[in-house]
Image: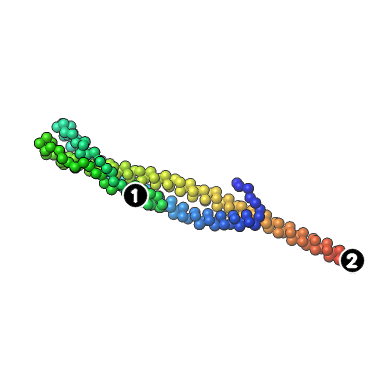
Amino acid sequence: MEKIKFTRDQLKQKVQLLEQYKRYLPILQLKKQQLQLEIAKYQKLMEEKTQIFEKKQKFCSDWIGLAKVDKIELRKWIKPTKINLTSKNIAGVELPVFLNLEFNPIDYDIFIYPLWADKAIDYLRELITIEEELKTIKKAIEILKDQLRITLQRVNLFEKIKIPQAEEAIHRIKIYLGDQFTNEVCRSKIAKKKLERIYFLQD
């Protein structure tokens, strides 16, 4: 615990600090609640998108198998050329938001590629898009959890250390100053009685 100066100035400083801590703590607690709520929303979204991804993955495995059998190269058409993201602010935290993927335009030789290639490419692009969206959601959850950890540390710091320390310091300073005042009053009374005795003897 920090060294306390038993002065009126120190008492004033500690009272001001305590007021600041008590104003700031509810803000931190609100941020904690917002982060927890947002994490729950993102985790639910993650579950929903994962289910969609797994269903599409099973469906697309047939197209991949067919491409292998026919020795058709599809990677060029399903590899993203650009990932478009934006961001949003939640409780003072910047989170990535997935928009879409850009791909090379399909311009293969229709005499070489089979008729099913267009559909296969479309389905595989959808699968890759959802996979990239899942990565963005996972990243957002990681950021939110990290911010929640920091916020919880600050809440605990204020609740368990800063506020109790300030209250304890204020209590001790008030007792000390009260004792000092009592001692001064006693000394003043003793001095007054001495003066009265001196005057009495002189008379």
User: Residue at horizontal 49%, vertical 50%?
Assistant: 155
Counting from the top left corner in percent of width and height, residue 201 is at 89, 65
Quarter of the view holding residue 63: top left
The reply to whether residue 4 is visible in this rendering is yes
Pointer 1: residues within 10 angstroms few (<14), some, or many (20+)?
few
Asked whether residue 51 is in view, the answer is no
Task: For the residues labelled 1 and 2, say whether their Cβ atoms are less than 8 Å apart.
Answer: no
Where residue 92 sits in the image (x, y, percent)? 41, 52
Residue underneath mark 2: 202
Residue 99 % position (x, y) = 28, 48
Q: How is the image coloured?
A: rainbow
Give amino acid for label 2.
Answer: Gln
Residue found at x 89% / y 68%: 203
Depicted 111 relative to depicted 194: above or below: above
Which labelled disc corresponds to residue 161?
Answer: none
State the mark number for residue 87.
1
Q: Answer with mark 1 or mark 2, whichever residue precedes in sequence.
A: 1
> Left of 89 or right of it: where is 196?
right
Front residue of this view, candidates 72 and 82: 82
